[in-house]
Image (cartoon, rainbow, N blue to C red):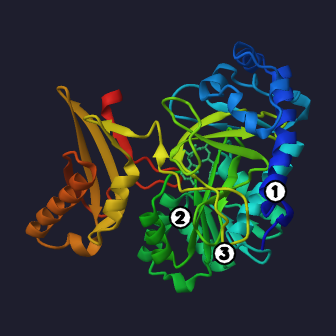
Amino acid sequence: MIWNESIECASRSTMKNIQTVRLKATVQRIYHNIPYYRKKMQEAGLTPEHIRTVDDLHLLPFTTKTDLRDSYPFGSFTAPMSEIVRVHASSGTTGRPTVVGYTRNDIAMWSENVTRALCMAGVHQNDMVQVAYGYGLFTGGLGLHYGTENLGATVIPISGGNTQKQIQLMQDFGSSVLCCTPSYALYIAEVLQEMNITPEDLKLRVGIFGAEPWSESMRHEIEDKLHIKAIDIYGLSEIVGPGVSCECEHQCGMHVNEDHFLPEIIDPETLQPLPPGEVGELVFSTITKEGIPLLRYRTRDLTRLIYDQCACGRTLVRMEKCKGRSDDMLIIRGVNVFPSQIESILLNMSETAPHYLLIVEREGNLDTLKVQVEVNEQFFSDEVKALQNLAKKIKSNIESTLGISVTVQLVEPKSIERSVGKAKRVIDKRQL
Ligand code: DLL
């Protein structure tokens, strides 16, 4: 089912007209309410009148996380506090959190987008949706919650953690949809196995997974273990939370709700827009938000946009699965390394479990990369020689892909810490 067919299947020219009207209104709103952005526009010699169509978007200055931090907590809001009905915040790893305020209309707009995402994933009113994303300042739990209610399906607001109880409710309530991070989905699969419960004992059909990068190999792993269709959902608190984009049942890129969020791809070095189809940094402008609209917000996420028509009939532009973040990219001895590349190699080997940790250190002037990976149960009981050979094989697979030397440390099954939210896969000791 397509939730909002007239928008989701609109022609490019209709979409551009909608975007133009909304972008112009947003530029006015921000110019007249946010001093730091007005200053940036003035420095670029711009007034709102210079933005005549959506094609003029590239003229506008960028907004960055630093702008939001500097205006902490409410300095980027363009609606009076009397109209703000909710705040969320992203913790971030350094510095102050980023605070996002929603008006009543913003909450309705967010729910509409999450409902579209659920329909893209093949969820319908009769579904029982277990929301195992965290509830609270993090947008995952409440975002999926409101979208599910808006669709008319049943929501189980269990939040993250307490895995045995998650599984018990899945059995007792017959949950058909699971929403959580992909790393938590894998952990749930592991606990199911320990409890001797098979996917056939459950009614799970669809998983809606996001909030962290995950590879195609990880998708296959989850689909095989839980016997579900694993759908990728994307979003960030600064823009709205989950539901900025989501895959449809064809699983070939996430449809961006571009009547609300305008995507662009730029070269993170030169900051120039890149031609359609090229990989670069994703930038979003919100064009309907009232609480905290943002123009050209740099997400740091790396992906590409796909403008071809999708088999589902939606014309909404798609963004490819994120390759990682420009600030997650490790530069090891001058070579760019994405954790997702290593993840794919490990997941394609039958002897290893999908749990790993990358540890980067500096010895003298030389960067070193250690890959800790869990060996799966059946293989671990094998002889030492076989383990040594396995470590060699992993090392050579990684080295031939990345072109740098690594050390591989095999660790016992279940020894790498599991997460119920976003997984931490990299420890970069060089920054300490
Ligand atoms: O993670 C919102 C969300 C909740 C999305 C639930 C999907 C599901 P933040 O905590 O602000 O918001 O983190 C946003 O997480 O810039 C990406 O780097 C990463 N991210 C989110 N979804 C995906 C995804 C939520 N599907 C940051 N694939 C973003 C890869 C993702 N990375």
Q: Residue furthest bottom?
A: 200
Q: Residue 334: give x, y in percent of width and height.
A: 28, 34
Identify the image quadrant of residue 356: bottom left
- Disc number for residue 36: none
Look at mark 3 in the image and give the residue it sits on.
175
**Few, some or many C-alpha atoms within 10 Å of disc 2 (few <14, some 14-19, many ≥20)?**
some
Please state which of the two labelled residues, at mark 3 or mark 1, is closer to the viewer.
Answer: 1
190 is higher (above) or lower (below) than 147: below
Q: Quadrant of the N terminus?
A: bottom right
Q: Residue furthest left?
A: 385
What type is the residue that disc 3 sits on? Ser
Q: Which residue is mark 1?
A: 112
Left or right relative to 381: residue 253: right
Viewer-closest of 315 and 387:
315
Residue appearing at x 68%, y 25% in the figure: 61
Q: Position of residue 186 (x, y in %)?
A: 46, 65
Residue 378, x across and y down, in percent: 26, 76
Q: Residue at x 27, y 54 (%)?
A: 401
Apparent side of residue 387 relative to residue 244 in the rendered image (left or right): left
Q: Residues within 10 Å of mark 3 (few under 14, many from 20)?
A: many
Mark 3 and mark 1 lie on one chain; the one further toward the N terminus is: 1
> Is residue 353 visible in this depiction of the protein?
yes
